[in-house]
């Protein structure tokens, strides 16, 4: 605890002029220029608003489904229209609301909660948001022109192959969702680096808010889970576009391969949705109970354990797919084991409420509703983990009920509690408590009426994904009850939206910690975040350091000014949170918006076969990204500077000490996981063969991959050598020589496979090899752009020992591409030897 006799980092009040300069640097642009803003507060609010819009739109689609199923033999919608509505409801809820809302709240809350001025890559956050918003809205509009996907939000082949889905509907899902997942991964990279490297001094990992722990675990899960769906959507789109039969059984493919890739993403996704909500609950419950969280360390361990177990559960959704008994038993056991760390959190929340003095308000009501609903969902989850029971209820409405109890109970109710709790951060105004009670009553009652009934409907045999049913089956009354409950739930959401708009229209007033919370986001804050970056000495700083708000507002902690005239925050060590260097952050820019619009346009126009327009958008995206990156990695205006009266730090960092190096490393982990998914597909298809290679197919002579690997190693050696000549003329020439090696290496790859007469359209085994080689080719294209970019910066004098992030990061990408090329050649040639 800070006491009067302790020395503060900046013990003297700061001159008024310094505050004005700080405000000017961080000032939010007005008018149309607001959309060029990259400040986490502005991007976070846009993110949250867009995610809530998709929640409402998906809810309307859900009501349309319930209206169709309210009575038997209903003709309100045709089977085709219902399939589109059903697919879009699940897709929008899962991909355009559930994941984005948790990242949106994190972008808005985490910097202030961690005591930082902003996240380390604000332009990346802006790009991630705009790609999601533009692409998501365009994707949703396919409903209005009859092009919405209609194969279910899980898109199982062969139903979604060309034979059964010959139109563009499935392509919109595959390309649209694919790049939206890229947006989610970009957000995860931002969060990991921000949480580990921009915490306030003294905020050791052991003192970090539980919500930040939850988001760190979730971001790591996204890095390892989401690449599988990117690989899966790529394979299915290649099958549809080029007739490469990855999932066509008659030509050596396997539809179960899609399920493996989809659910390796899909079941961790359930916990990716739940864990941020659990983190919010662990943040709000101590406030409403008025005491520290019981079992804080146990909760943090439980969060990590849930993240770990979640990757063992993907076949939880495949118990009826014909897997082996041993494999299913393992997954069944893991499905039950994950309930243990989840239960630890629930008991810790109950203990905190039991020991504290609970204030009953809007957040309290939604948190209590969350615990009731989520525990019921967890119990049915354990039920469907039992193999014989799952065989009976799989693909019935019992699963629909379980899914909604886990996802709506486990995420939507905590999110609504969080919006009531954190809304005063926006304009200082709280939402109406009397109205909140009506909102909660309608949502809680309507939800349970709608979805608890579905358990019974499912046990009576009603299958999922049917657009109507016969009156003689005995489901009539239950379906009508579910429909009435859904509309009651929707009335609660509508009332919430009305009160939300009314509250946001109120005049802004000073935010004054109305809940008496313990976490740093309730410190006085402006566009620049806190007036000074606080020094943290406890788990609950606003409770255990009672004078902290006054000290921070008076500029008595770190960085109460702009030391370089740019946007800045402190970079601290990942474990102990000791100040390391002053991190200069990029300012507002239109380029992330332009790059995002170009990316969205490329994928969406490519879907409708507008090739020229698509490539124009793609080139626009590439040019905008190049200009955006060209503006970064400049020499800092000074080598060292004071960040307080008692501390001098370096300005910026290079190599493994810099935030950009770690961002690149995480991106390469994502990259490697996508590559591993392609290799898994190759192994899976090979294991189904009686003879590998299949008749009529052959591998190229080993001469070609050996030559290619040798050239890749030579290129990496040249890049490593170029780093010894930073700032001098040989550096760009060595980079171009390395690029020539990479291009020649890929030429050897292509020539070898051409001579082997591998025909991807003939057999899935050949197609799997073509997919791996194509992925390496994509890296060659990226390295070509990166190499030319690096050489140009070298010739312009923008690469030096003080501004070397470009060459360090390109070198990481280069060495990774070398390793991937060698690994690809080894896997392609080694698997047939093992199968022989």
Image: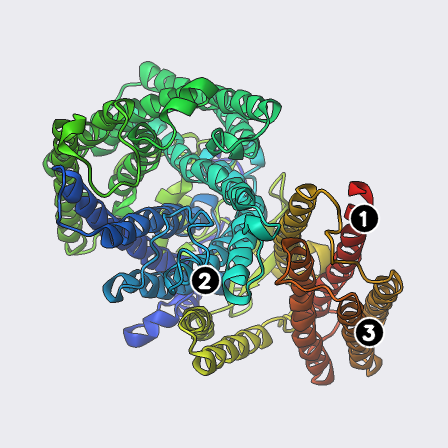
Above/below status of 241 relative to 796: above
Point out the frontmost of discs 1 and 3: 1
**Residue closest to the eye, 52 or 721:** 52
The circle on residue 773 is: none
* Label annotation for residue 830: 1
SS type, badge 3: helix
Picture residue at 87% right of the left edge, 67% below the top: 707
Q: Which residue is mark 3?
A: 741
* Residue in view at x 32 percent, y 22 percent: 376
Tell me which label, 1 or 3, sits earlier in the chain: 3
Q: What residue does disc 2 label?
A: 175
* Residue 822 higher or lower than 363, as above or below: below
Q: In front of the other: label 3 or label 2?
A: 2
Q: Check the image and report above or below for 149 versus 567.
A: above
| Percent position of residue 72, x then y | 13, 37
Q: Secondary structure at mark 1?
A: helix
Picture quarter containing residue 726? bottom right
């Amino acid at each position: 605890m800070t006491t009067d006799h302790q020395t503060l980092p900046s013990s003297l009040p700061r001159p008024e002029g310094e505050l004005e300069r700080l405000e000017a640097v961080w000032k939010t642009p007005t008018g149309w220029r607001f959309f060029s803003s990259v400040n986490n507060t502005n991007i976070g609010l846009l993110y949250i608003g867009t995610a809530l819009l998709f929640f409402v739109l998906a809810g309307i689609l859900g009501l349309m489904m319930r209206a169709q199923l309210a009575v038997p033999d209903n003709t309100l919608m045709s089977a085709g229209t219902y399939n589109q509505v059903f697919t879009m409801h699940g897709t929008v809820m899962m991909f355009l609301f559930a994941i984005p809302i948790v990242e949106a709240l994190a972008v808005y809350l985490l910097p202030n909660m961690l005591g930082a001025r902003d996240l380390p890559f604000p332009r990346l956050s802006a790009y991630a948001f705009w790609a999601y918003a533009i692409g998501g809205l365009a994707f949703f509009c396919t409903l209005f022109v009859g092009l919405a996907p209609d194969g279910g939000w899980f898109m199982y082949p062969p139903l979604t192959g060309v034979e059964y889905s010959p139109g563009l509907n499935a392509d919109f899902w595959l390309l649209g969702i694919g790049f939206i997942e890229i947006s989610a991964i970009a957000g995860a990279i931002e969060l990991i680096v921000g949480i580990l490297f921009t915490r306030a001094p003294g905020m050791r990992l052991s003192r970090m808010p539980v919500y930040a722990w939850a988001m760190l675990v979730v971001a790591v899960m996204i890095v390892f889970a989401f690449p599988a769906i990117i690989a899966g959507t790529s394979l299915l789109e290649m099958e549809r576009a080029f007739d490469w039969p990855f999932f066509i059984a008659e030509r050596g493919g396997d539809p179960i391969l899609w399920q493996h890739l989809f659910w390796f993403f899909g079941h961790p996704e359930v916990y990716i949705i739940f864990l941020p909500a659990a983190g919010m609950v662990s943040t709000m419950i101590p406030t409403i109970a008025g005491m520290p969280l019981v079992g804080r360390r146990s909760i943090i361990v439980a969060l990590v354990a849930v993240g770990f177990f979640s990757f063992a559960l993907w076949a939880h959704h495949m118990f009826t797919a014909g897997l082996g008994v041993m494999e299913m038993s393992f997954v069944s056991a893991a499905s039950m084991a994950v309930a243990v760390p989840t239960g630890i959190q629930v008991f810790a929340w109950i203990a905190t409420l039991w020991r504290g003095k609970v204030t009953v308000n809007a957040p309290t009501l939604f948190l209590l509703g969350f615990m009731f609903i989520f525990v019921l969902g967890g119990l049915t989850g354990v039920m469907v983990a039992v193999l014989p029971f799952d065989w009976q209820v799989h693909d019935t409405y019992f699963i629909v009920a379980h899914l909604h109890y886990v996802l709506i109970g486990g995420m939507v109710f905590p999110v609504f509690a969080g919006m009531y709790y954190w809304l005063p951060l926006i304009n200082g105004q709280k939402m109406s408590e009397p109205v909140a009670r009506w909102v909660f009553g309608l949502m809680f009652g309507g939800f349970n009426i709608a979805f608890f009934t579905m358990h019974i409907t499912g046990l009576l045999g009603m299958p999922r994904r049917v657009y109507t049913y016969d009156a003689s089956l005995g489901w009539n009354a239950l379906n009508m009850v579910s429909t009435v409950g859904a509309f009651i739930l929707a009335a609660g959401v509508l009332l919430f939206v009305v009160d939300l708009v009314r509250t946001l229209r109120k005049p802004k007033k000073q935010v004054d910690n109305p809940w008496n919370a313990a976490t740093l986001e309730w410190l006085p804050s402006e566009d620049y975040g806190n007036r000074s970056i606080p020094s943290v000495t406890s788990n609950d700083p606003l409770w255990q350091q009672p004078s902290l708000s006054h000290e921070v507002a008076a500029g008595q902690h770190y960085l109460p000014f702009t030391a370089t005239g740019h946007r800045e925050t402190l970079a601290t060590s990942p474990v102990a949170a000791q100040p390391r260097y002053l991190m200069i952050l990029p300012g507002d820019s239109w380029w992330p918006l332009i790059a995002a619009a170009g990316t969205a346009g490329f994928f969406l126009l490519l879907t409708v076969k507008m090739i020229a327009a698509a490539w124009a958008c793609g080139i626009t995206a590439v040019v905008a990204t190049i200009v955006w990156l060209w503006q970064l990695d400049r020499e800092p205006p000074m080598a060292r500077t004071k960040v307080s009266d008692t501390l001098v730090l370096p300005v910026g960092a290079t190599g493994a000490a810099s935030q950009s190096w770690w961002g690149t490393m995480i991106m390469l982990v994502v990259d490697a996981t996508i590559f591993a998914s392609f290799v898994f597909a190759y192994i899976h298809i090979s294991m189904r063969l009686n003879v590998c290679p299949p008749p009529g197919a052959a591998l190229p002579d080993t001469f070609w991959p050996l030559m290619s690997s040798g050239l890749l190693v030579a290129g990496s050696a040249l890049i490593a050598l170029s780093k010894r000549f930073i700032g001098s003329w040989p550096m760009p020439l060595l980079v171009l020589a390395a690029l020539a090696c990479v291009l020649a290496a890929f030429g050897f790859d292509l020539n070898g496979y051409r001579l082997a007469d591998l025909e991807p359209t003939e057999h899935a085994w050949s197609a799997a090899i073509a997919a791996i080689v194509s992925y390496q080719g994509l890296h060659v294209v990226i390295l070509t752009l990166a190499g030319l970019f690096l050489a140009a910066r070298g010739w312009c004098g923008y690469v030096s020992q003080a501004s070397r992030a470009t060459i360090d990061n390109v070198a990481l990408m280069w060495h990774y591409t070398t390793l991937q090329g060698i690994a690809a050649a080894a896997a392609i040639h080694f698997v047939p030897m093992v199968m022989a």
